[in-house]
Amino acid sequence: MAYTYKEEFIRFMAESGVLTFGDFTLKSGRKAPYFINCGNYKTGAQLARLGEFYAECIKDNNIPVETLFGPAYKGIPLAVSAVVALSNKFGIDVSYCFDRKEVKDHGEGGMFVGKTLADGEKVVIIDDVMTSGKALSESVPKLKSAADVNITGMVITVDRMEKALNSELSAVQEAFKTYGIKVYSIVNIDDIIKAIEDGVVEGREYLGKMREYRAQYGAAY
């Protein structure tokens, strides 16, 4: 059976132990029937494949990009894997950079490693998931302090499509409202539910709870 890259990604998450089903208490206090733990990507093969899915998402959505930015620390290997995949799989050669948590005051100095940003440069931010939007709120001023870059989007693995605790909007929707930056996800929770329905991955016994959770906490899209 031929799968779309979204279906392949959902299978990849399940095989990697990143997507699991059961009864989980989230940081928000909500009881969820599924959990996404991106910390379970551990091997070189997994990281290489993950980069290919980021590259597919960038290409599929025609996101203009000259530099990929990976917020420290989790975003660094993600941006590196994605920039390599864009080159190897699609022949699209772009730059990458990442930030330091602390500004370096010796050697070459500065806050960023990799590409020196320039005014007007098309930058795409790469991260794993978006829960509160903290990575974006920290990244935007850092990037803008380096140069007047054009942040053309942010790419994450999964959009939970879930209302924030104090808003009817999801973190992805809040990001667009606050910064005017569109957040693209490789897949969203509706894609995962459909993949279970279609037998792409196991988990049919959790479909009822997943639909209920989506109805209770899901943001309107």
Image (cartoon, grey):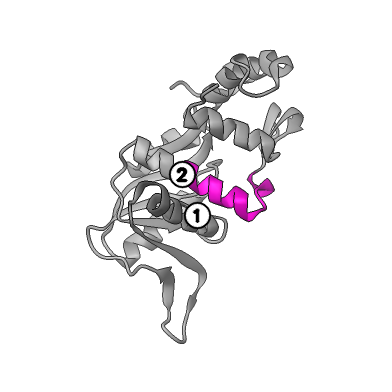
What is the chief secondary structure element of the magenta stretch?
helix
Residue 116 located left or right of residue 72: left
Tell me the distance, in whole angstroms, between the alpha carbons under discs 2 and 1: 9 Å
Q: Secondary structure at mark 1?
A: helix
Of the image marks 2 and 1, the number of the one nearer the N terminus: 2
Residue 201 located left or right of residue 125: right
Q: Which residues are magenta?
A: 38-54
Question: Which of the numbered marks, if any, corresponds to residue 81?
Answer: 1
Q: Residue at x 22, y 58 (%)?
A: 120
Using the rendered view, name the quadrant where residue 96 is placed. Answer: bottom left
Mark 1: give few (<14), some (14-19) or many (20+) Cα within 10 Å. Answer: many
Using the rendered view, name the quadrant where residue 107 is placed. Answer: bottom left
Residue situated in front as seen by the camera: 109 or 180:
109
Q: Position of residue 75 (x, y in %)?
A: 52, 55
51 in the magenta segment: yes
Residue situated in front as seen by the camera: 48 or 103:
48
Q: Identify which amino acid the numbered label 2 is placed on.
A: Tyr
Give the mark count: 2
Mark 2: give few (<14), some (14-19) or many (20+) Cα within 10 Å. Answer: many
Residue situated in front as seen by the camera: 173 or 106:
106
Question: Which of the numbered marks, if any, corresponds to residue 188?
Answer: none
Residue 29 located left or right of residue 135: right
Say if residue 11 shows up in the picture. Answer: yes
17 in the magenta segment: no
Q: Position of residue 103 (x, y in %)?
A: 47, 75
Q: Which residue appears farthest toward the front when viewing the image? A: 1
Q: Cβ–Cβ below 8 Å for labels 2 and 1?
A: yes
Q: Which residue is mark 2?
A: 54
In the rendered image, the vertical position of residue 187 relative to residue 220, given as above or below = below
Q: Residue at x 54, y 27 (%)?
A: 7
Q: Identify which amino acid the numbered label 1 is placed on.
A: Ser
Q: Position of residue 88 (x, y in %)?
A: 41, 52
